């Protein structure tokens, strides 16, 4: 392997398993990916992938190439972070990763105020249940509820929020209100898929769930809200948004949980002017939250 351009094509195919997936990730056409892989194999005099009808599978030579290719990737990203980290101008692009719920209530208002004060700053906002990899520059900064442990990341606690148990007015009219200590007996539950939030399947805000019936599962917080509003069942939701939904009613008010919200940024980018400007704006949103 002679350069990073070769490595990125190789890694994209190795990670996605197809030329189409790699092309989408790299923003090029499928033929270009196939041609670059063929040229790389010719240069190395080794077959890196077995071509099956559905996937590209690494050969032993391809497997041996993963570690050095990823080392090149890390070196390139480190160069990018350090160069970007030297920028002290209030302009440029910020990539922000968050959830749709935090984005709606806190991140978008902060971005609006940031843009009003600094028109030269552009924002790319990615909302996903997945945790963005800041080391690989998938995002410059993340607002999330899980605190990472990586020493390369700077972590700041933005605030603590409360969650409660909610159901729609229509659901409660038809099924009645669940009673505390009843473990949701006779009630339908709306849940995150178990691999995403396994603790939710044991209890909602401390109320055991074993007697309830899981009627709906989702990977999306937005869909969790919509399912509850539609009357599909009882669920746990963040109060800052659920209390503003006219169709939702909080039940078992003595049952509650609290969770922290963290701002996460890579150390190489943390002190750039535009990142600091956003941090100031998002911190103010949390400080002013009721």
Image (spheres, helix red, strand yellow):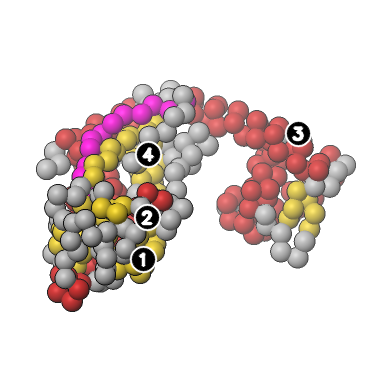
Task: Check if mark 1's residue and mark 3's residue have beta carbons within 8 Å.
Answer: no
The label nearer to you, 4 versus 3, is: 4
Q: Disc 4 or 2, which lies upstream in sequence?
A: 4
Task: Check if mark 4's residue and mark 2's residue have beta carbons within 8 Å.
Answer: no
Where does the image place residue 256, in percent across and percent down from the top left? 20, 47
| Distance CA(mark 4)–CA(mark 1) | 25 Å
| Distance CA(mark 1)–CA(mark 2) | 9 Å
The label nearer to you, 4 versus 1, is: 1
Q: Disc 1 or 3, which lies upstream in sequence?
A: 3
Q: Count neighbours of disc 4 (C-alpha within 10 A) and say few if under 14, some if 14 to 19, many if 20 or more.
A: few
259 or 21: nearer the viewer? 259
User: Which residue is denoted by mark 1 in the rendering?
Assistant: 214
Q: Which residues are magenta?
A: 152-163
Q: Residue visible at 34% across and 59% down?
A: 210
In the image, residue 25 sits, relative to residue 94, either above or below, namely: below
Q: Residue visible at 32% across and 63% down?
A: 211
Q: Decide whether residue 156 is among the magenta residues.
A: yes
- Residue 201 badge: 2
User: Which residue is denoted by mark 3 in the rendering?
Assistant: 2
Q: Residue visible at 59% across and 49% down?
A: 26
Q: Is residue 211 visible?
A: yes
Which SS class for mark 3?
A: loop
Q: Count neighbours of disc 3 (C-alpha within 10 A) and say few if under 14, some if 14 to 19, many if 20 or more.
A: few
Which SS class for mark 2?
A: helix
Q: Residue visible at 65% across and 30% down?
A: 71
């Amino acid at each position: 392997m002679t350069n990073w351009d070769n490595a990125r094509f190789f890694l994209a195919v190795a990670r996605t398993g197809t030329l189409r997936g790699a092309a989408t990730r790299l923003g090029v056409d499928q033929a270009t990916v196939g041609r670059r892989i063929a040229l790389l194999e010719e240069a190395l005099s080794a077959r890196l992938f077995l071509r099956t009808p559905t996937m590209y599978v690494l050969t032993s030579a391809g497997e041996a190439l993963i570690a050095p290719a990823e080392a090149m990737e890390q070196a390139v990203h480190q160069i990018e972070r350090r160069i970007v980290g030297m920028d002290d101008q209030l302009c440029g692009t910020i990539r922000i990763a968050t959830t749709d719920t935090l984005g709606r209530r806190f991140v978008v208002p902060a971005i609006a105020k940031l843009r009003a004060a600094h028109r030269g700053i552009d924002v790319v906002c990615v909302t996903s249940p997945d945790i963005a990899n800041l080391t690989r520059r998938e995002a410059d900064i993340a607002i999330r509820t899980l605190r990472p442990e990586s020493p390369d990341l700077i972590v700041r606690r933005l605030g603590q929020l409360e969650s409660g148990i909610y159901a729609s007015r229509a659901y409660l009219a038809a099924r009645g209100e669940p009673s505390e200590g009843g473990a949701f007996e006779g009630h339908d539950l709306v849940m995150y898929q178990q691999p995403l939030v396994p603790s939710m399947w044991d209890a909602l805000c401390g109320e055991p769930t074993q007697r309830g019936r899981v009627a709906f599962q989702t990977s999306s917080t937005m869909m969790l809200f919509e399912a509850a509003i539609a009357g599909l069942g009882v669920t746990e939701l963040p109060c800052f948004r659920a209390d503003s939904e006219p169709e939702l009613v909080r039940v078992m008010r003595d049952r509650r949980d609290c969770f922290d919200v963290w701002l996460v940024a890579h150390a190489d980018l943390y002190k750039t002017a535009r990142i600091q400007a956003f941090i100031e704006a998002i911190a103010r949103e949390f400080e002013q939250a009721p």
